[in-house]
Amino acid sequence: MTVNDTNSKIEPGQENSRSLILGSAVVLTNGSLAHVDAKTAHGLIRGTERFDIKGIIDHNNAGQDAGEVLDGIRRTIPVYADIDAYIAAAGQKPDYAIIGVALCGGRLDEQWQALVLRIINRGVSIVNGMHMLLDDIPVFKEAARHNNVTIIDIRRPKPFNQLQFWSGKIFSMKIPRLAVLGTDCALGKRTTARMIVEACRKAEIHAEMIYTGQTGWLQGNRYGFILDTTVNDFVSGELEAAIIRCEQEARPDLIVVEGQSGMRNPQGPCGAEIIVSGNIKGVVLQHTPFREFYDATDALGCYLPDIDSEIKLIEMYGTSVIAVTLNGTGGSREELLSYRRTLEKRIGIPVICPIEEPIDKIMPVLQKFILDHGRLPDTTSRAMIKQKEACDD
């Protein structure tokens, strides 16, 4: 089963309604709950409108509250050692078990595969966000059939005939849109994007998020696509199509696009296509000041770029960085806030630590961006395009 197969259960326009809920779920982290690899689980602990999260399966943190393990905030989501412990405590099986990690290369090792197979054989459906498509592997497919459960492979590519090619219709879209980009992967871009949307709604600004990764869909966002499963020729078109659909159906005051990876991450650079093909006129840049190397490249010594050069690079694409948000992992609270004060004074735009302090500080610059958006230039010089067309004629 694919994401598209599940969409028929979701009522359009009901993104905040319980009708979005596909069912009860536990999240599998297999001992990694406190590690950055469990970022999918972290997102679901912080909130989802698509599943009713009943617990986390993680033997290293069993007996604790998942929110307290994540960031010290109690969320009344218990952590269980295994699926049997959950069933014994709850008195019933969950509808789904969600694989809550994002592993390099998107593959599940033998230990993970054994865990997933064991849960299928307990009669629980699997939601899989890995590139490794479980429903294509005979042992999983047969186990699911035998136990009358489903496997939802979120990263199954869309059929070719459903993919959209970039059309240029993005230039006719009027609703302000900004992107949350980052200097690296796994540093909280999606979390910050969700927080911005929530802060806007609290301020009675209707904001919608365009998801570009598996967790954004798992959290219940209605509009988006999974970028790293999309054939490269169609990434720009799928982004454009998601923005157009969001504008035409939801008609929000602001569209927030989730970024992926980093502009110069050698493992998979990303960002330019979001800015240019989405005609994104404003960027919130997420940065982690205490990370020396790109994620998972320590042995190669691939240095993370400094924030100033990243801002300059982004703005070379015809957009503006309107705020910076910080991930403080690796430093103390005092070190992070000191860095924030120094950086904000130097670059002259708001710098916010969204986990450590209220994100409401970003609202004045967002409100100004919304008001000014119609007067901001496109990221692509269309006058040059028209001139070229005239020459071609």
Image (cartoon, grey):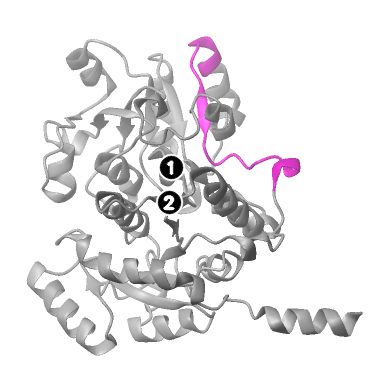
Q: Point out which mark residue 209 bears.
A: 2
**For residue 332, which quarter of the picture?**
bottom left
Q: Name the residue under label 1.
A: 221
- Assess whether mark 1 and mark 2 are in contact (beta carbons under 8 angstroms): yes
> Where residue 328 appears, x then y in whole percent?
20, 66
Give the left or right position of residue 181, taking residue 272 as reference.
Answer: left
Magenta part of the protein: which range?
144-163
Give neighbour class at mark 1: few <14, some 14-19, many 20+ (Cα, 10 Å).
many
Q: Where, quadrant-wise, is the C terminus in this rendering?
A: bottom right
Camera-side residue: 377 or 285?
A: 377
| Amino acid type assigned to the residue bearing label 2 in the image | Met
Say whether residue 52 is visible. Answer: yes
The single residue placed furthest to the bottom in the displayed view is 346
Is 170 within the magenta? no
Task: List x then y, in percent, for residue 365.
Answer: 30, 71
Identify whether 327 is placed above or below 26: below
**Residue 278 coordinates in the image, percent (x, y):** 57, 64
Residue neighbourhood size for the residue with mark 2, other residues' Cα within 10 Å, grouped as few (<14), some (14–19), many (≥20): many
Give the quarter of the image for residue 24: top left
Give the CA distance from mark 2 to mark 1.
Answer: 7 Å
| Mark 2: secondary structure | strand
Give the percent coordinates (x, y) of residue 75. 15, 37
